[in-house]
Amino acid sequence: MENIDKKLREEAKRLLEEKKVDVLIGYETGTLPLTATPCFITNPEDAEKLVWNAFCTQNLAKFVHDLISQHRESQKRVKPEDRKKKVVGVVARGCTTRSIVLHLQERQYARDEIVIIGVPCTGYVDRKRLSALVGGEDIREGAREGDQLVVKTAVGEKRIPLKDALAANCLTCRFNNPIMSDVMIGEQAPPMSPDQEYVEIEAFENLPTEERWAYFTKEMNKCIRCYACRQACPSCYCKTCFVEQSQPQWVGLGEDATDTQVFQLMRLFHMVGRCVDCGSCVSVCPMGVDLRKFLKKIDKDCFELFENRAGSSMEDAPPLSRAKEHDKEDFVFNP
Amino acid sequence: MARRKFATLKRFLDYIGLEGDRTIFTWISASEGERFANVIKGVTAKVRALGPATKLVKKL
Ligand code: SF4
Ligand code: SF4
């Protein structure tokens, strides 16, 4: 790990010094123990802050999109001959590169506006899981020792196998190495267990309808509509989100449970062929809503019906932008 | 494209626990009057069998 950090910093510093990138998005150590937080680096000296470890949770493609679209917007006020291109560098693991592929396919920015520093990924720690493993106690200090996390809380010290604390999406991840990169740091990471990826979904599919509905409503009742999931999601980048539109108003803002259910349904359904299973929405949700149970189903259907996995290849166009003659039609009602 | 959206939407609504028969799609051309009547008959029969909707209904 030390070695990776060192290489990462060198590479980042070089890119900034040679002005290959205007800003570099990466992770730095967070203010709480066992956390990392996104950071934006413009000064080559600050590259020393960069880290790459099992506490880097958020999908940084979100910020790539934000920075480039804001920059483009700001350039509209500049005389055409004075307009500048802004190049954004990003530290990207597998799912981040999938989001970048998606952005490129959806024509959000051009390939020459980004520089990808690829990093291998062996999964990140799910803060909620970790917290549950220490009985919800405040984590005062922590460190990683090999395959274990040593966590100190008010009630004492505990050793936790890293694997137990990894996020669910990481454990069954199919693309833990970058899909594409300009520079690659470190060796390819060993595969996770993608063969298990739909086990949970299949079990849920086999439950009776009413149980599924009960689970859906139970989960959605937790939601406080803070929209943190939308803010964190790289695929949620509409300038005006349907939840904030008032003409027409697609979904009510009141306390009615159906409004929340409709909000969730619509956001989830906008993820067909677009959710890369990065888990960013799940990790930022303050209420612990089980969003993945529904997102992963969309991914499963998308693969079964259209043989597509979101952002997995530049050549494979987004599934909802094309159709094949032999697409299944068994859902069509023909009395 | 619309066909693909319908296919995924129907599966998804079924998955979250809406009765599958409440989401019905088909293609009808403007010139197919008889087919239109048949489809509507089929749809009403299915919905009647299910009874009034209780899910995703907003009380105003
Ligand atoms: S919906 Fe969640 S898991 Fe999917 S791409 Fe967006 S943030 Fe990532
Ligand atoms: S982050 Fe969680 S609580 Fe907030 S809107 Fe999303 S699902 Fe609801």
Image (tube, rainbow, N blue to C red):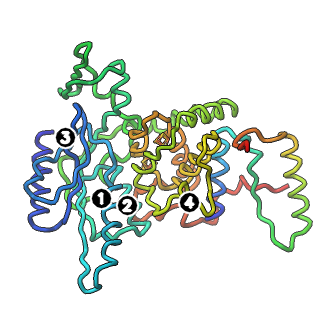
State the quadrant of the C terminus of chain A: bottom right
For the residues marked 2 and 1, what is the alpha-carbon distance in whole angstroms? Answer: 8 Å
Hey, what amino acid is under mark 3? Thr
Q: Secondary structure at mark 2?
A: helix
Q: Is A261 displayed left or right of A95 in the figure? A: right
Q: Nearer the viewer, mark 4 or mark 2?
A: 4
Which chain's residue wears label 3?
A: A
- Tell me the crowding category of disc 4: few under 14, some 14 to 19, or many 20 or more residues within 10 angstroms, Cα based: few
Residue wearing tag 3: A29
Are the residues tagged 2 and 1 within 8 Å (C-beta)?
Answer: yes
Q: B5 or A303: which is nearer to us?
A: B5
Query: Nearest the camera: A33 or A306?
Result: A33
Marked residue chain, label 2 = A
Residue occupied by mark 1: A180
Identify the amino acid type marked 2. Answer: Val
Distance from label 1 to label 3 (Cα)?
Answer: 26 Å
Circle nearer the N terminus (3, 2): 3
Query: Chain letter of disc 4?
Result: A
Disc nearest the viewer among 3 and 2: 3
Instruction: Determine the CA span between mark 4 and mark 2.
Output: 28 Å
Q: Are marks 3 and 2 on the same chain?
A: yes
